[in-house]
Image: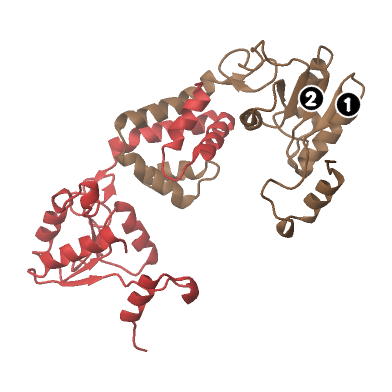
Chain colours: A brown, B red
């Protein structure tokens, strides 16, 4: 295996990159500027040195505290619970949420050997003793995400906080004909009055 | 921009990786083994140091001469002309061709400012003075690939070699209803008698 095949093999281990795409990327790096390759390599090396988990919410960031937790403008009475640090970026992109986040770093998934003790649930409960009034559970609409949400609800009802969950239903532009039954029944149950 | 965003930006510049995939890859590298990240970075750095063009055919390889040109078992009377080094791997995967390759490193494309002098055409003509009997032109079935093929044919007719071109027509599994007119007319013109 030459250096080109070896690099393609490594790229093919990254998420969303198949064998052919990996080869295409490896070939493309033969034609790029040397500085680009050096930059990319150094960014990969430095990633884990520079990025750590925010000591408050657990999101990935460069400092001790992430820019959102550190921002005095954010509403400290709301916490949005997400599975992954990247999920908070998706919610931020809507511009609808102005509170803080809490990153679980996973979901309860017995099949993968992940239990509640492997997530940052204790830390979330400790955060709910303060000024927090509402916890919005924004785990994915999957079996694991729903299980984790239900587990969190059972723990949070002992705290003096309102607990909500992201609405589940038709995606915008969705067509009733092609939507699955479970989504459709959820969007019926969660119907909103005009 | 933190280290995570910077890495995602670099990944998004690679072919076939969009903004979201790049972010996903950058996040995934936070969770991989440190050794994997170090390996990937070193492979990127070493790529251009280790890989060079074969002095005979121009394919990317680690030594002075690529394994195919160096293999005494290969048929030295046939040369398959390809646009990119990666194209020879596609042809090799069919197991149908046992001759040598010649990599043009591009196609004639006036819009991109690439003329015949920018390709390895002179070298191909010099190779055709020896034992070569047939040149198979395997450039892509695009306007640029066809232009380059016609140009090569005009030069090669002065040499004592047979010149052929990859057949163009219906892909296997292709449906007449969905195929474009040009492909269909080519597959008609290139019809094969039973």
Which residue is at a point 61% across and 12% down the rendered structure image?
A64
Q: Mark 1 points at which residue?
A: A155
The reply to whether residue B102 is in sight is: yes
A176 lies above or below B2:
below
Q: Callout 1 environment at 10 Å: few (<14), some (14 to 19), or many (20+)? A: few
Query: With A129 as the anchor, is A95 left or right in this view?
Result: left
Position of residue B5 measured from the top left corner of the image (x, y, whole percent): 51, 27
Q: Identify the secondary structure beneath mark 2.
A: helix
Residue toward you, B3 or A178: A178
Position of residue A73 measured from the top left corner of the image (x, y, whole percent): 67, 13
Nearer the N terminus, badge 2 or badge 1? 2
Chain letter of mark 2 equals A
The reply to whether residue A109 is in sight is: no
Q: Does the CB distance between marks 2 and 1 fall below 8 Å?
A: yes
B75 lies above or below A171:
below
Query: With A60 as the anchor, is B106 left or right in this view?
Result: left
Query: With B154 as the anchor, is B20 left or right in this view?
Result: right
Q: Mark 2 points at which residue?
A: A121
Q: Identify the secondary structure beneath mark 1.
A: helix
A124 lies above or below B173:
above
Q: Quadrant of the C terminus of chain A?
A: top right
Which residue is at a point 29% across and 53% down the rendered structure image?
B84
């Amino acid at each position: 295996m030459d250096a080109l095949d070896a690099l393609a093999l490594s790229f093919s281990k990254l998420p969303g990159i198949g064998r052919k795409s990996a080869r295409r990327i490896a070939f493309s790096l033969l034609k790029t500027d040397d500085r680009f390759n050096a930059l990319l390599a150094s960014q990969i090396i430095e990633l884990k040195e520079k990025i750590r988990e925010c000591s408050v919410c657990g999101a990935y960031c460069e400092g001790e505290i992430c820019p959102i937790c550190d921002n005095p403008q954010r509403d400290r009475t709301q916490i949005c619970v997400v599975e992954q640090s990247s999920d908070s970026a998706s919610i931020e992109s809507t511009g609808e949420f102005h509170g803080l986040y809490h990153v679980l770093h996973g979901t309860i998934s017995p099949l993968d050997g992940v239990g509640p003790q492997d997530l940052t649930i204790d830390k979330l409960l400790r955060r709910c003793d303060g000024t927090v009034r509402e916890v919005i559970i924004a785990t994915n609409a999957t079996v694991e995400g729903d299980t984790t949400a239900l587990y969190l609800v059972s723990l949070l009802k002992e705290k003096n906080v309102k607990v909500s969950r992201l609405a589940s239903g038709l995606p915008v532009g969705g067509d009733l004909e092609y939507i699955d039954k479970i989504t459709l029944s959820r969007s019926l149950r969660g119907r909103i009055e005009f």
